[in-house]
Image (spheres, coloured by chain):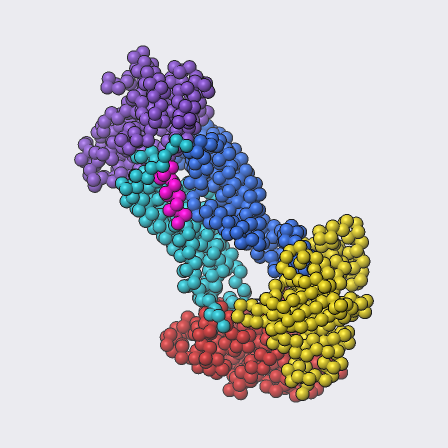
Chain colours: A cyan, B purple, C blue, D red, E yellow
Amino acid sequence: MTYTFNFDWIAQYWPVIVKGILITLELTFVGGVVGILLGILCAFVKLYGAAPLRFVVGAYVELIRNTPFLVQLFFIFFGLPALGVRLGELEAANIAMVVNLGAYACEIIRAGIQATPKGQFEAGVSLAMTRLETFRHVVLVPSLQRIWPALSSQLVIVMLGSAVVSQIAAEDLTYAANFIQSRTFRAFEAYFVSTLIYLVLAIVLRQAMAGLGVLIFPRRSSR
Amino acid sequence: GQHAAAAGLDAVEQRGTLRVAVPQDFPPFGSVGTDMTPQGYDIDMAKLIADKIGVKLELVPVTSANRIPYLQTDKVDLVISSLGKNAEREAVIDFSDAYAPFYNGVFGPKDSGVSKPEDLSGKTVGVTRGSVEDLELSKIAPSDATLKRYEDNNGTISAFLSDQVDVVATGNVVAAAILAKNPPRKPEPLFLIKNSPCYVGMSKNEPKLMEKVNAIVAEAKKDGSLDAISEKWLGVKLPEDI
Amino acid sequence: MTDFTLWDIARNLLLALRWTVLLSLVSFVGGGLVGLLILFARIARPRALRVAAKLYIELFQGTPLLMQLFLAFFGFGLFGVSVPAWLAAGIALILWAAAFLGEIWRGCVEAIARGQWEASASLGMSRFEQMRHVILPQALKIAVPPTVGFSVQVVKGTALTSIIGFVELTKAGTIVTNATFQPFTVYGLVALFYFALCWPLSLTSQALERKLNVSHSHY
Amino acid sequence: MSLIAITDVHKRFGENEVLKGIDLDIAKGEVIAIIGKSGSGKSTLLRCINGLETIDSGSILVGGVQLSSEEKQLRDLRQKVGMIFQQFNLFPHLSAGRNVMLAQTVVKKTPKAEARKIAEEMLDKVGLAHRFDALPDELSGGQQQRVAIARALAMKPAALLCDEITSALDPELVAEVLQVVRRLAEDGMTLITVTHEMNFAREVCSRVVFMHLGRVHEIGPPAEVFGAPKTPELRQFLGVN
Amino acid sequence: MSLIAITDVHKRFGENEVLKGIDLDIAKGEVIAIIGKSGSGKSTLLRCINGLETIDSGSILVGGVQLSSEEKQLRDLRQKVGMIFQQFNLFPHLSAGRNVMLAQTVVKKTPKAEARKIAEEMLDKVGLAHRFDALPDELSGGQQQRVAIARALAMKPAALLCDEITSALDPELVAEVLQVVRRLAEDGMTLITVTHEMNFAREVCSRVVFMHLGRVHEIGPPAEVFGAPKTPELRQFLGVN
Ligand SMILES: Nc1ncnc2c1ncn2[C@@H]1O[C@H](COP(=O)(O)OP(=O)(O)OP(=O)(O)O)[C@@H](O)[C@H]1O
Ligand SMILES: Nc1ncnc2c1ncn2[C@@H]1O[C@H](COP(=O)(O)OP(=O)(O)OP(=O)(O)O)[C@@H](O)[C@H]1O
Ligand SMILES: [Mg+2]
Ligand SMILES: [Mg+2]
């Protein structure tokens, strides 16, 4: 092999990488929190909402799940200005992440809710709670607990998918890699380093979600 | 080493084909026709070099992200992809003599009040990441100008047209092509950055190949064939300083 | 600048769509086969195999497919091994899909009641025979909906092969946009074609899921 | 005036007419046992009283108010009439105490501290004050059912509907739950229980309702119903000839 | 020589020692009933004999061969000792007949045609020859359990382990399954059954084993165990004083 790896550039470019990591984390965090909230809302509407609302949510979910994230991103960033909504690349990226995860989370959460025994709902209602109150206090937490692993996986997928936001000049981790390689022509090294960082982020994210799960969901203490 | 012996000019002649990385997303240097075949300044340049060496030409369409890895892993012999030069890049690959002018400048609405680099202060500038103008503008732009670096030319132009950036830095031919389409937002020339020419890229330490390419470029300048290419794609003759 | 008619744009995108379909088929079928191996390793008796499979899954689910493709194509090249683009794309997509499919299917295998393992063991079947005759036939049935669902991800995942030179649907869209400066028309069509390809798969998956749920409620 | 007045109630599921005209008046403080074969419509009747099923015709008045399917009104009704299920249906993510507190804070807007006091009181009433913080998973079936009773009681209902609340329990656990119900009856709670425990029905109830094919087939004080069943269907059900 | 010889078997799950030294010899043709409270280790003992659980110490010999955890040997053992489960565990994707054929063709490499003949024979033995092509879903619980018995019998085992094979069944279906087991016993099959059916144990078994807290607490012919229980634990279990 004639190619010799050279990582000297790190000394000069590490701020770009750190910024990239932070932005990737921001996108994942905002996408994760707001996206899951949106998913919960959509799941509720899809299960209990009025027919027209159900249709709108259904169309949204199908549209998002069956088209590439990149195209969605382009429409938000380049398309919305035509309608008078001009978003910065970070806002656009964040919104695209939320919209994307929201659709997937909706389906995952809906499945979790549907797996809730009917008796839980009836018990809530027969204690004079409204449907919304029953959903909020009785159905939601156990449903989330049921689908938490699936949701965590989806979040990792979305985090990795966020790489394409570099196309609209959002300065995430992939942007950092591309920026560095465009200056230094050290493509292998830049991609290798960013891949490793993604791997670490994915593992950390999974662990964090597991830890969060332990915090949110009660577990029986051993008898 | 061994590897080098099998590469370079000898390998090209032995193989009978010259493999060249060309852009597909950077008109007028490289784009496609309605039949998706590559066309543009860089493609004609590649044809010229292959002709002169006397071998067949194999065009390999590349992006800005993968053009150098193609070269480094010996999947192409030359990169003719409107490459600009800087010191860091020269540490990794070798550059021939310049084969094309690249007049780049900053373009934007007339009323943007920009007429020199200092005026970019506080403005948002769209530019294609890794392009010649990216390298140049990064050097001269004031520190409080925001550079938005898009993946490809299309991103940069779309960003300008959709009002995501105040002005763009790009080739004057690119700007002219857009102006010709009479868009709602017009990229009028504001100021010229400089003529920062394009070079042919090749693996390091291929003296024979370098010599050959430089000779072909020099001859093409002399016999007017490069002028012809320039006129075809850029609408003007090759400038004196190339 | 060449002038593209709407038909030119659509025609070129449709031609590129062939690559999307072909790559999807290759990665889905190949990923299925390798995924089966991953599944077997993941639930094998020897700990080493299980751990290896787990690491494999972590690696391929934890890094961007784009980087996997890049490293598969150019990484070997660094060592002087020339891997053609179609092979690199095939390998990377297959390994990536296998990680996801293996994990999806493991869930399905684990959903089969323990009693089925015990009953078949107590009839003297070996672990492989148990899998082959008792567990897999049942697991595959419940695995169909999520598997079809994942095929949508595969279709969309093939877009990333442009990093190693494939002009599939998304890449063709970028190229044509750069020649036409009509991003809305082009990406609108791109989205439409993806939707036309993926939506039937989604619908099938949902329909199968519903059907399965119904048959479950009999128990 | 009767607390619950059921008049000519009909209910069908598709083709299947499950309730074929039920008339039943229940006074405050009464303890009613509903018995009958599987499928005779016992659960459906209870669920109709609680508004979990809508009725097709007839009327149900609770405390003089007509039952409708209007949400707000249903909520009022359900504060007056609690229900306990065969499968307990405790909320698995909440401790026993929080199970009892939840509806108070959500529905009645009782302040947390007060809700907690009431929850402790109710758990004490069912003999589980010491398991306030236990999750449902950590409780035996009998304990879970007692928490469910405490949960319903915390809403201070005027009447309690119990649907086979002991049939998911092991025999040894049945006694502890019945003990609790017996005490409620003594305290004057209005109780309507579907039950298979004939001894319980005999000893505790003021009236026994025998349902058959979607109708109230026989009704009367336990001594009468068990001691001198009039219809052959009831005799067959009781296994006497 | 005894067919199954169990010597000082210990088994623990984590902290919990479930079997605390079991000694038991079973001769060919014996019919043994194992009785005892829930949690006393009955199922665990059966599962150990069949190699579904590994033992921590002691030894189990079947037909003179020591039980190990080696795969090949386990397979041989399991061809000698069949097991039937409370939950039937039929393969839901195969018809009744194919359920009975599967292990023969896979494990013993019996040719299809012959396996089919044996399957028909075995289904006939349990009175289900006419349901050869029915899927498990289409059979009643009692029929499913009888298919499970036929499936075990088709491997021509020397002994059969039955773990509460009637407790998932409605009372009316219990009889049909017990009838089949009774006939097996009469035919000389070695049977070890965990059961709550005391009448069955009394009438059919040669010996009754009472397990308590992980030990064989009392053992003897049914007349002795049921007629004159020696220990207070057994007396309590049987409800006699
Ligand atoms: N949601 C429903 N949809 C359709 N049919 C139903 C529904 N709920 C109950 N039924 C039918 O109504 C009839 C009466 O059911 P119900 O549960 O009231 O009987 P029950 O007297 O409570 O019987 P059990 O003692 O078995 O609980 C049954 O035939 C049942 O199948
Ligand atoms: N896989 C396991 N892991 C941990 N503990 C177990 C396991 N299997 C059984 N046990 C424990 O071992 C003890 C004995 O269980 P076993 O199933 O043998 O009892 P049993 O006599 O069959 O009871 P039953 O009549 O309820 O079936 C119980 O306390 C049970 O909780
Ligand atoms: Mg009922
Ligand atoms: Mg047991």
Q: Is residue B205 above or below residue B53?
A: below
Residue D137: percent from the left, percent from the top?
A: 51, 70
Side of C182 relative to D96 (left or right)? left
Quarter of image, res C189: top left
Q: Is residue B223 above or below residue E106?
A: above
Residue range highlighted in magenta: A188-200
Q: Quadrant of the C terminus of chain B?
A: top left
Q: Reply yes or no: does residue A193 show up in magenta.
A: yes
Side of E210 relative to A183 (left or right)? right
Give me the residue at 38% from left, 74% from top. D112
**Residue B151 shows up from this direction:** no
Give me the residue at 61% from left, 78% from top. D171
Q: Reply yes or no: does residue A176 show up in magenta.
A: no
Give me the residue at 43% from left, 79% from top. D120
Q: Residue lying farthest top? A: B223
Quarter of image, res E69: bottom right
Q: Main secondary structure of the magenta part?
A: helix
Side of E12 relative to E65 (left or right)? left
Q: Quadrant of the N terminus of chain B?
A: top left
Give me the residue at 75% from left, 58% from top. E155
Residue B200: percent from the left, percent from the top?
A: 33, 24
Q: Is residue C126 above or below residue B1?
A: below
In the image shown, does E218 or B160 lie closer to the viewer? E218
**Residue C187 shows up from this direction:** yes
In the image shown, does B236 or E170 lie closer to the viewer? E170
Residue A86: percent from the left, percent from the top?
A: 31, 43
Residue B176: percent from the left, percent from the top?
A: 30, 26
In the image shown, does D81 or B198 lie closer to the viewer? B198
Q: Is residue D69 above or below residue D189?
A: above
